[in-house]
Amino acid sequence: MKFNLIVILLILAEANFSQQGDLQNRFMLAQSYEQIGEYVKAKPIYEELYKAQPNNFTFFQSLNKCYIQLKEYNNSSFLIQQKLSVEKDNISLVGMLGTTLYLNGDEKRAFQLWDDYLKNKNDIISYRTLANTAIELRAFDKAIDLLHRAKLISGKDFYLGYDLANLYALKMDYKKCAEEFITILRADYKQFPSVESRIFTYAARSEALNVFINVFEDEQPEQFPAIGNILAKLYTASRRYEKAFSLYKTLDNKEQYKGNDLFAFAAQLSLEKEYASAAEVFSYLLKKYPDAPFQLQIKLNLAKNSEARLEIETADSAQLWKTFPSKKYFHEKLYEEPLSIYREVAEKNPFSEQGVEAIFHLGYLYGRKIGDTKESEKSFNNIISNFLFSGFYTDACLVMAAMQLQQGNINKASSFYDKILSNPRANDENKNKAKFWKAKMAFFRGDFTESNKLLRQLVSASGDNISNDALELSFLLTSAFNDSLTLVKFAEGDFALLVNQFDKAGKTFSSLVKTEQTPFLIKQLAELRLIESDISLDRYQQALDQVDSLLKRDEKNIFADKANLLAAKIYRYGLKNPAKAIEEYQNLLLRFPDSLYLDEAREAINKLRNKIS
């Protein structure tokens, strides 16, 4: 008898396992249909599964989801209400039923259902749960209502502030969004980093930025450092630098920040290339905190920003936009402020890296801007002789080599490039520059084999201008390696450009362009060089005519995009015609969608449009 009972139990268990396995297989089949959007085929399977196991919540959820996808809202409502009749206090079911009603267009009943459920609830979790359901439905107003009621229950003004701020931002109600952040900051200033991060995520939109500024201005920013600090950064983001500076000074005096926030503000301005404003802040710090531990950094930054400001102010007269600008020097008095600071830093810190940096800038200004070669070489030779392991050693060698090249001293220039290549601390970028220029000098000398050999040693680096120049020179050598006379002539023209003999260079390149026997690639590059020579000589219309002729020809010049770019620059800087410059930049974008100059063209278009408006 006992044996028979065991057998019966085993048979029943096996049948049960078999049934369970069958249900699981059918569930997987329904899911497969669901994944490919075949809800009509999935529906009867889910209905069978739910009928077989009405207490299986997974089957229940899947069936309801299927009804929703098929927009069978009445079926969904009936299904959930059946479940609710048994589990009256199940908030998940209340949320699901509200969702069905809402999707069926009965928003009023959906929200009333939730409100009725919450009447006797004093727990915040219930409110948040239904608020999240409302958010999923993008019913943001209802979600805000529920979260505000939850906040009242909590008794804390700043509770749920982040959630509410996010919802207001989604609704583009930036005023209320900002007010929530103000509430959080007033309740707990330690929330400053989180609030700041959230605000600047939303403030990326200009309309939000202005609203945030207006709200924060009304909240006594001078009295509350957290609010004031964010407002100052909002001013900076909106380019209201004077207001930001004024507020930072007020906060600095009141809170005794000892210039730290002002220093960070000035550094940010410098990064944004607002050199004049940055210099003004550094100058203020220099006078305000004469004994500050970071006084040296203040002085160096003041000098560098003053130098950068002058670089921009003199850019037009220096004609730095040209590929080969003529030498243009300025009176030493113009650079009096940065020069005096660099001298002071160099004298008081003769063996520090900051001191070496100051010496480098002295050499650069005297050599490149003032034209005092003797004073410039004195500074650079000081670095090269005494600071082999300084980060400015290779930079000094590069500038010295360039100065020697412009004077026609190829051998002297080569010796400085050798110093870079033998320096263990030289980075790959500077080593590549040295290798390229040694290859270029071999080219000038007519030693094309040596030039090719050096070019092959170059380290390839994406986006590296030296790599692009090396590629250009390599193509040139490859295309006419057996035509040494043509290469020698091209090298003469290139060298003439380097030493500012633009008229000689123009005649050389013009001859190469007109000679039928000139190899194809050399002729194309010679045509580009001829345009660049005319630009250097201010023959803008002549250069534009050549660009126009080049672009209209049937054959495709591989340097055509650069020629187009030069035309845009002529209109922008040479002829001061921003409308025509924009037109040429746009032509570049249309004609050459794969050009390396697309980013430069887009940036120029934006700047010119802003200037015109």
Image (spheres, grey):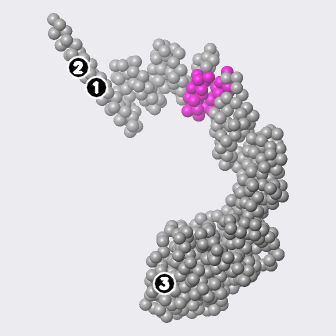
Q: Name the residue tied to disc 3.
A: 451
Distance (Cα) linking label 3 and label 1: 77 Å
Residue 516 on image: x %, y %: 50, 92
For the point 60% across and 86% down, the residue is 412
For the point 75% across and 45% down, the residue is 229
Distance (Cα) linking label 1 and label 2: 10 Å
Magenta stretch prevailing secondary structure: helix
Q: Secondary structure at mark 1?
A: helix
Q: Which residues are magenta?
A: 124-153
Q: Is residue 313 magenta?
A: no
Q: Name the residue tied to disc 1.
A: 21
Residue 215 vs residue 231, the one in the foreground: 231
> What's the residue type where badge 3 is placed?
Ser
Q: Is residue 254 left or right of residue 157?
A: right
> What's the residue type where badge 1 is placed?
Gly
On the image, which quarter does residue 221 sit in? top right
Bin the neighbour count of mark 2 within 10 Å (Cα to Cα): few under 14, some 14-19, many 20 and up. few
Q: Name the residue tied to disc 2.
A: 14
Q: Secondary structure at mark 2?
A: helix
> What's the residue type where badge 2 is placed?
Glu
Q: Is residue 215 left or right of residue 484?
A: right
On the image, which quarter does residue 6 sit in? top left
Can I make out residue 197 in this image? yes
For the point 18% across and 13% down, the residue is 7
Residue 136 on image: x %, y %: 55, 33
Q: Secondary structure at mark 3?
A: helix
For the point 78% across and 68% down, the residue is 344
Quadrant where the N terminus lies?
top left
Residue 457 on image: x %, y %: 46, 76
**Mark 2 or mark 3: which comes first in sequence?**
2
**Mark 1 or mark 2: which comes first in sequence?**
2
Quadrant where the C terminus lies?
bottom right
